Amino acid sequence: MPDFPELDLRERIVRIDQMLIDIERDLAERDRARTDVGRLEAERDRRRQEMRYQPILAMIAGLTAGAALFAAGAAFVKLFGG
């Protein structure tokens, strides 16, 4: 198109603008993906901490239940045994 060089230049500018828009869109998608990964990692860490303390919580619940049964037994013996 030697007769209309300004059209060729405009076409190139349009292509460059489209490439810039595509690059910005790709970067935004990557940022969203990184945010999602960070959120999932935080969720995983929180669940790992919860799982880490579950045996301790079960032990405390067992000790509490045992103490309650012991206290109930002692009250029963005191009430009816003595």
Image: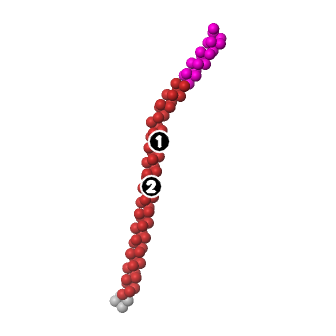
The span picked out in magenta is 65-82
Q: Percent x, y for residue 7?
A: 40, 85
**Predominant SS along the magenta part:** helix
Place residue 14 in its image quadrant. Answer: bottom left
The residue positioned 45% from the left and 49% from the top of the image is 40
Q: Is residue 79 above or below residue 54?
A: above
Magenta stretch: includes residue 74: yes
Secondary structure at badge 2 equals: helix
Near mark 1 (Cα within 10 A), the count class, few <14, some 14-19 or many ≥20, is: few
Residue designated by label 1 = 47
Which residue is nearer to you in this view: 4 or 49? 49
Q: Amino acid at mark 2?
A: Thr
Q: Percent x, y for residue 80?
A: 65, 11
Q: Percent x, y for residue 57?
A: 50, 31
Q: Percent x, y for residue 17?
A: 41, 75
Q: Quadrant of the C terminus?
A: top right
Q: Is residue 37 above or below residue 77?
A: below
Place residue 79 in its image quadrant. Answer: top right
Q: Quadrant of the N terminus?
A: bottom left
The residue positioned 36% from the left and 87% from the top of the image is 5
Residue designated by label 2 = 35
Q: Amino acid at mark 1?
A: Arg
The colour scheme of the drawn protein is secondary structure
Magenta stretch: includes residue 4: no
